[in-house]
Image (cartoon, grey):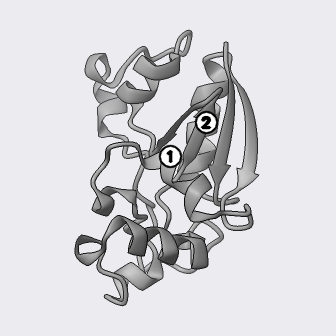
Amino acid sequence: MSTVIFYEKPGCINNTKQKALLRAAGHEVEAHNLLTAPWTENNLRPFFGSLAVEEWFNRSAPAIKAGEVIPETLTADMALQLMVQNPLLIRRPLMQVGNQKMVGFDINTVDAWIGLQPIEVTSAATNPALQAQDLQTCPRTHADTFCSSHA
């Protein structure tokens, strides 16, 4: 199994579920605080691979919800500068196994990358309950009371 370097927002409900899935599959999870990691444009960029710039962002970030940051209008350089200044903008989690890096937690993508067996559920494609789970979007809304998992 793999050692997964996992950058999270401590207290995030979905990050907690994601780490549990990785551990249940036998992976070692080395969790780090995404908000306090020493990000630079150079060490952050590899996590996004070939994704479009707008896919790099945490859509629950307050600056995005308030319309202060509009990901679709940004170049890669502009996006990286903003993310280094305000890590809440970074889509979670960021994961690294060896030299390979990725952003987000699409179950099928992670399963194909490092494997999510022997968890009870083998894939979203074969389990309707898992298909219904959104492990990438913050489950909290502005109507909810503020909690440590928000944004």
Whether pointer 1 and pointer 2 mark residues with C-beta atoms closer than 8 Å, the reply is yes
Which residue is disc 1 drawn over?
47
Residue type at mark 1? Phe
The answer to which of marks 1 and 2 sits earlier in the sequence is 1
Which residue shows up at 64% across the image and 60% down it? 9
Which residue is disc 2 drawn over?
96
Cα–Cα gap, marks 1 and 2: 8 Å
Residue furthest to the left: 72
Residue type at mark 2? Gln
Q: Is residue 81 above or below residue 18?
A: below
Say the numbered circle drawn on residue 58: none
Q: Circle 1 sits in a helix, a strand or a loop, which is it?
A: helix
> Mark 2: few, some, or many residues within 10 Å (few <14, many ≥20)?
some
Towards the viewer: 46 or 136: 46
Q: Circle 2 sits in a helix, a strand or a loop, which is it?
A: strand
Q: Position of residue 119 (x, y in %)?
A: 54, 15
Q: Position of residue 57 (x, y in %)?
A: 40, 64
Query: Horizontally, is 130 left or right of 45 in the view?
Result: left
